[in-house]
Amino acid sequence: MVTQSAASTSHPSELAQPINKTAHEFDKTALDALLARRFFFAPAFEIYGGVAGLYDYGPTGSALQANVLDAWRKHYIIEEDMLELDTTIMTLSEVLKTSGHVDKFADWMVKDVQTGEIFRADHLVEAVIEARLKGDKEARGVKDEPVVEEDDKKKKKKKNVKSVAIKLDDEVVAEYESLLAQIDNYTGPELGELVRKHNIRNPTTGNELSEPVEFNLMFESNIGPTGQIKGYLRPETAQGHFVNFARLLEFNNGKVPFASAQIGRSFRNEIAPRQGLLRVREFTMAEIEHYVDPLDKRHARFNEVKDVVLTLLPKDIQSEGKTDTTQMTVGDAVAKKIVDNETLGYFLGRTQLFLQKIGIDPKRMRCRQHMANEMAHYAADCWDFEIQSSYGWIECVGCADRSAYDLTVHSVRTKQPLRVQQKLDQPRKVEKLDVQFDAKKFGMTFKKDATMIKDTLLGLEKDKLQCIKDELVNGKSSVKCADGKSYDITSDLVKIEPITVTEHMREFTPNVIEPSFGIGRILYSLLEHSYWAREQDKARGVLSLPSVVAPIKCLIVTISQDAELRAKIHEISRKMRRIGIASRVDDSSASIGKKYARNDELGTPFGCTVDFATIQKGTITLRERDSTNQLIGQVDDVIAVVDQLVKGTIDWKGASEKLEPYSGVQDVEE
Ligand code: AMP
């Protein structure tokens, strides 16, 4: 008797068709429905009504995140021999005061002067100007890209800045486009000017807006019952690295360069979280702090990435109000000084490779350089990896050269030497400025402040000391101390003289290059980039996640509810799980086509089907998700091939060389 074979139970559309992933326009509503249905993530406390900016990941989202993080650990921590950390989330307020977060980690917000409704200033300006440009296009009869809505709430928001078909003067269009290209570069007062100049109002009420005011994004807390120790939930993991620098340096035998790395939660009390996982109040970060000699920012493995091609959007292009990108190798970008140094270039190259490896579309990735106002004052250079999704270009990884700022401020505040001592090959003569004090007079003049002022003078860089020396020629100068006050000093209290010393050691504060990854943003972008629908059936959504990150690697099904076959799929699943392959049995009564469709939605890259040939000949079939092509082989051979596919040591072509193609017809006696 001829029994039904695995292939003949396939959905008719699955029979060896060329893959066309762009047959249908990207459908955000369908993707959102899929992500909710398959519980990738959902609003936290949903049954209580939820809170904006907080999300829970379900079994699929958690597995996807764990796999992205595992790939990240392998790509960076293991492959580059980084020192891994797991530091506390609750952070002493003094640490964040020293780092500048207590005073400066803020966004600008504006209020509707009548209703009190709050907006993030830059986002509102951007949304209103974008809507005006859209209205202009409508008035000119130019078809715009379809606007993608996130959910009902977002729809309302978008509706608030609804476009009206009004034609703008050409100069106004140019001005608006230039403004948008530089939207990240405006200070609070500049945003206030833009609001006035362009008559930007609350889009819902039409009311005027207040001047922008700063809102600190950190969640404040108390440590212990007395309420005397103040703390914050950390807004980044970086400070946990810096406060442990001395131990890390010792662990690395006192030598730089080396890097520390940490994966963990961070918290930001965003003014108006929207855009799903892209702007949330609690999120997972993966951060690297690479410590390097400020006089030598070369990287020993630079050659390995020098040919990686990046899509660059340098700052001078943006300052001209443009967003044209240039394709360039990492090697050229560093040689032409577009990227400041080799180490920064190295991490840009490595990040490009990482994002590609986990499935981000390289055509929808670009490196945007920070403009002057955007960049922290201490930073030497900064590039964001932006990924394009239906929400536009979003920063997903920041790569900054933070110079010696963090280690210096923590060192000054704690008086701990967060510096590297390097034995010189040859002793060298160095011209220095020696500071001498009249101890008695100095103590009597400054009393309790004397030690602080003395330490500050002794810790000054040579050029600063030279300025004070020059001023003392006229009898008087001043020095600014950590308490924020300036103290007058006179030539009878302090003498500064040049001396020549022979140095056997060199001492320096390392500079820090920091790649900082927002995992939720990468994860969401990846889901959008992976999503498509089968040409023959728009309702059949597929997530083409690479097997390295797919939540489940292999689906195991049977063509019938026969008890022997059902026992077989559990046996195969156990075998796979034992060797670490996340497999999933679907023994429901649904048709095989339905089972495959369900797993296409989960992004499961491979599927094994057990049929009566399994019992009689020991064979199973192996299906590849995107092409739906099938191979056949002995159970253990197929498992071995799946193992290699999942590990990435072979691809589907390699698998096709190890297993027979499945013809779709298999005659087996029942
Ligand atoms: P930053 O320190 O602001 O450069 O942020 C580092 C990375 O964290 C960014 O590249 C984002 O990927 C991520 N990130 C920052 N803020 C948020 C947020 N509110 N929600 C999700 N991810 C964020």
Image: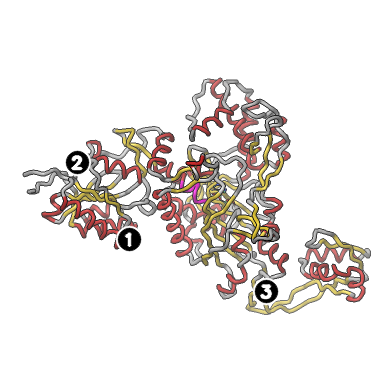
**Relative to 207, residue 378 above or below:** below
Q: Residue at x 29, y 41 (%)?
A: 597
Tag 2 residue:
9
Mark identifier at residue 533: none
* Mark 3: secondary structure: strand
Badge 1 vs badge 2, beta-carbon distance below 8 Å? no
Question: Residue placed farthest to the left in the image?
Answer: 1
Instruction: Please provide the residue range marked out in magenta.
Output: 518-523
The dominant secondary structure in magenta is helix
**As shown in the figure, which amino acid type bears the numbered disc 2?**
Thr
Three-letter amino acid code at disc 3?
A: Arg
Relative to 58, residue 468 above or below:
below
Which circle's residue, 2 or 3, is located before the other in the chain? 2
Q: Which residue is mark 1?
A: 580
Q: Secondary structure at mark 2?
A: helix
Q: Give me the C-alpha separation between circle 2 and circle 3.
A: 73 Å
| Residue where numbered disc 3 is placed | 506
Can the viewer see residue 16?
no
C-alpha span from label 1 to label 2 = 29 Å
Q: Is mark 1 within 8 Å of ligand 1?
A: no
